[in-house]
Amino acid sequence: NRQFPGRADGDYPQRLAYTILSLIEEERPEVVLDLHTDSINSIAYTIVDFPKTVKDTKIIKNCMKLAYDLGFHWALDSEEAAGYPIEKSLSGALVTKGIKAVTIELGGPWVISEEFRKLGFDAVWRLLGKYDMVKVSPAQKIIETDIDTENILVFKDDVKIQSTGIVEFRVTPGQKIEAGQVLGKVRDVFGRTIETITSPRPGVIFSHDDQ
């Protein structure tokens, strides 16, 4: 997912990325959903990639509407926040080509979670219903509403601890937070606080990183 657009004559990951992207470009689907897993402690959420090379923001607005329809928390991601050229991801590469695509993060790695499997299935099923590809119940239908453009979340901070110790979280993924709010404490083996972690800005916690 950092190899796009890939190379036809590159190493195996580059060739694989090139093949995937070429197939999608040839088919020109209306929507592409890239399903991923995040850290062990996370909520289900959607990433809308906003490569700095994209000048026409209409495609970004379409991706935002897609993320909104999926029903999860979602946020705009950029090279500044991600730390790498965002168009090297599949969704980012597709957005640069005018194809509506988002990345969905569904739970932690290595373990199949029934909770996140169901969340992902239900979201995709509702979206298929919107395009009349499957029949959905009235309760499953996506209600067409405008996006609240005043309160769009943007990935800004990956808050890191500066000490070695036992982390005691004071907030949970999905929780709204305020600037300066205590996110957690780092304690030594005797229970003494050696660092207090605070939020640099208001926002929403998407995950507790497990790295």
Image (tube, grey):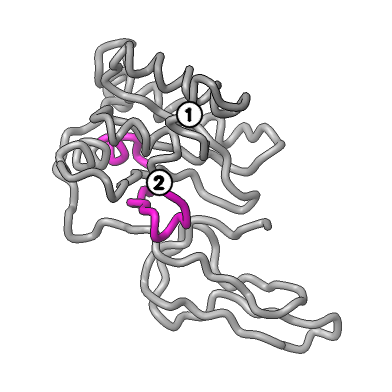
Answer with left or right where residue 209 lies relative to residue 5: right
Q: The residue tagged with tag 2: helix, strand or loop?
A: helix
- Residue 95's disc number: none
**Residue lying furthest right in this view?**
190
Q: CA distance from mark 1 to mark 2?
A: 14 Å
- Give the camera-side residue of 160 and 201: 160
Q: Is residue 36 above or below residue 161?
A: above
**Picture residue at 46% right of the left edge, 33% below the top:** 4
Q: Is residue 11 above or below residue 24?
A: below
Which residue corresponds to mark 1?
Answer: 6
**Picture residue at 53% right of the left edge, 36% below the top:** 36
Give how far across and how far down residue 172 sits, in percent: 55, 62
Residues in magenta, as a range:
66-86
**Picture residue at 56% right of the left edge, 30% below the top:** 117
Answer with left or right where residue 9 lies relative to residue 95: right
**Picture residue at 49% right of the left edge, 26% below the top:** 7
Residue 84 located within the stretch drawn in magenta: yes
Q: Tell me which amino acid carries mark 2.
A: Ile
- Give the camera-side residue of 150 and 163: 163
Q: The residue tagged with tag 1: helix, strand or loop?
A: loop
* Crowd class of label 1 (few under 14; some 14 to 19; many from 20; radius 10 Å): many
Answer with left or right where residue 94 lies relative to residue 61: right
How many marks do you count on the picture?
2
Which residue corresponds to mark 2?
Answer: 86
